Amino acid sequence: MPLDATSLNMGTVYLVGAGPGDPDLLTVKAARLLKSADVVVYDRLISHDILDQVPAGTTRIYVGKQEGRHHMNQTEINQLLIALARRHQAVVRLKGGDPFVFGRGSEEALVLARQGIPFEVVPGVTAASGCTAYAGIPLTHRELSRRVMFVTGRCSDAEPPRIDSGVAADEQCTLVIYMGLRQLPAIMERIRAAGRPPDTPVAVIENGSLASQRRCLGRLDTIAEQVRDANVQSPALLVVGRVVDLAPELDWFRPPMEPAAAVPSVLSRAAGA
Ligand code: SAH
């Protein structure tokens, strides 16, 4: 019999998307795996409410991951997953949003595949759909947006974020920018320089889908100042495009337990909204 993963009694690593934070947005499969896992490896974007779904007796391992400050680096995380798969039947690697959207889930999957370790990928609600839905912003809307682009705003300090100028200028394209808070002024400038009108609506969603969610609504030429004044913190998602104009009217989300009046969920509105 060949000496493969099965004969070595290797466990399975589940790369599980946890969604943007509200535990009700976990998939049925994710919720089931959280209950049955031997060990759960998670990072910073995982909300307390989601961790509360993990039974008390299950081993939890925090591997950090905060922009510019990693508790464990990616190589160490990869090694950890391999070691855990050799010791446990079911290892859940829990990631914010969807594991295959800016989550380095594919890098971890490649490492597992190359080591012959069985793995499964469990998709999750990515921030682009989860946070916008909870902020009342449709990604597309007839006549306002025909296309959506997910972009990473992450880049080195020396180099401004690269957003294709054709896409940046395309008024029918909703731009959803992940990891863009730190470079927000440079990103807005880049989009303006590409030719989008300065009054293009922009939203910044902080802690999307959580009770602490805040929306900051503004325009390309005002949002940087608004975000600074409101002291918006990570995680935050940037959304650029005319669909943002619908946010005041589609503002449905009322976090449980906190009366709407007590939560300043709208920090500022686009002029005239
Ligand atoms: N895999 C994740 C993205 C990881 S990159 C997903 O599919 O959603 C991390 C970035 O995602 C953050 O910097 C932020 O831009 C965005 N993000 C994730 N969760 C968020 C949340 N609850 N609220 C706002 N932004 C969020």
Image (cartoon, rainbow, N blue to C red):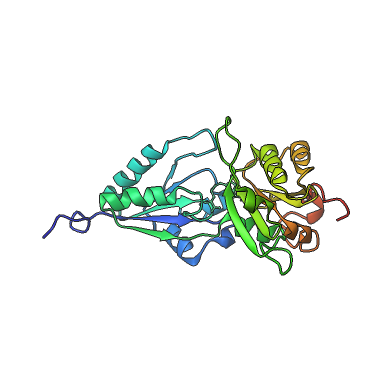
- x and y percentages locating residue 157 in the rendered image: 58, 31
Where is 51 relative to 67, above or below?
A: below
Decide if residue 57 is in sight here: no
Furthest residue in direction right, as rendered = 272
Q: Quadrant of the C terminus?
A: bottom right
Where is 1 relative to 94, above or below?
A: below
Question: Which residue is located at x 72 percent, y 48 percent?
Answer: 195
Question: Which residue is located at x 75 percent, y 36 percent?
Answer: 228
Furthest residue in direction bottom, as rendered = 142
Decide if residue 167 is in sight here: yes
Q: Quadrant of the N terminus?
A: bottom left
- x and y percentages locating residue 196 in the rendered image: 73, 50
Question: Which residue is located at x 67 percent, y 57 percent?
Answer: 174
121 left or right of 148? left
Furthest residue in direction left, as rendered = 1
Residue 127 lies in what quarter of the image?
bottom right
- x and y percentages locating residue 136 in the rendered image: 72, 61
